[in-house]
Amino acid sequence: AQSVTQLDSQVPVFEEAPVELRCNYSSSVSVYLFWYVQYPNQGLQLLLKYLSGSTLVKGINGFEAEFNKSQTSFHLRKPSVHISDTAEYFCAVKYGGATNKLIFGTGTLLAVQP
Amino acid sequence: NAGVTQTPKFQVLKTGQSMTLQCAQDMNHNSMYWYRQDPGMGLRLIYYSASEGTTDKGEVPNGYNVSRLNKREFSLRLESAAPSQTSVYFCASSPSDRTYEQYFGPGTRLTVT
């Protein structure tokens, strides 16, 4: 079955430290990958996406992610986090097919501490 | 340009009551979606509408109905609410069902007692 796995439900980190949020997906011939961010009591906002081309994708707010086909991963990274990055982060995958159905991971809460 | 709007923001229902969640988008998008978000489960697709006049079931459609009223509006109806439907509901839209990026509304927090 097609699935998306975010193993870390919560990642605590100190301000200005680097962070990596992990995302793995079930293997498929073609995938399109997304990271969304949800700030408290708000909707989801697109952070970055991989559709094709360069495997290193840069997004808003200094985040980047790398598509690794052999490891079926799309981990999200930021070299130095801020308090304002505290939010829930969702990885989502669209598997090759006719309709635009996104499959979401269960989310990772990034908790940035001073 | 408001994007995707949802009403109401909060709602409390008693078991067995009915209600309709409203969603509208002003981006001239063809496709619209309803998700529910539950702790530890991410977002799950309830129903979607690839284009005006069409609707299809998603992963968790039981207990819900939808109406694509026109290109702008896509409503979600709970005919007889159950406590298991306590959740946060998000509406989203995309330019087409082959466009991968979806734009989300602010959500409706529903509690069924």
Image: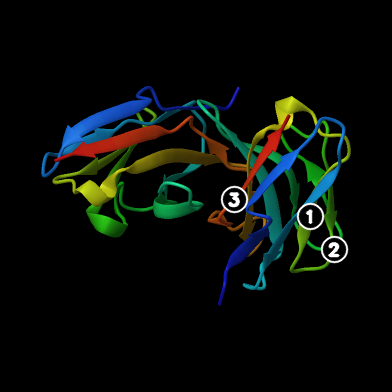
Q: Name the residue type under label 3.
A: Gly
Farthest residue, direction left: A16
- The quadrant in which the C terminus of chain B is found is top right
Q: Name the residue type under label 1.
A: Ser
Disc 1: which residue: B75
Q: Tag 3, which secondary structure?
A: loop
Chain for mark 2? B
Q: Tag 2, which secondary structure?
A: loop
Chain for mark 1? B
Q: Residue at x 57, y 68 (%)?
A: B3
Disc 2: which residue: B69
Of residue A54 and residue A48, the one placed in the foreground of this image is: A48
Q: Name the residue type under label 2.
A: Leu
Label located before the other in sequence (3 or 2): 2
User: Residue A65's mark?
Assistant: none
| Disc 1 packing (10 Å; few <14; some 14–19; many ≥20) | many
Up/down of B35 relative to B1, above or below: above
Q: CA distance from mark 3 to mark 2?
A: 19 Å
Horizontal side of A1 relative to A13 (left or right) equals right
User: Residue B107's mark?
Assistant: 3
Are the residues tagged 2 and 1 within 8 Å (C-beta)? Answer: yes
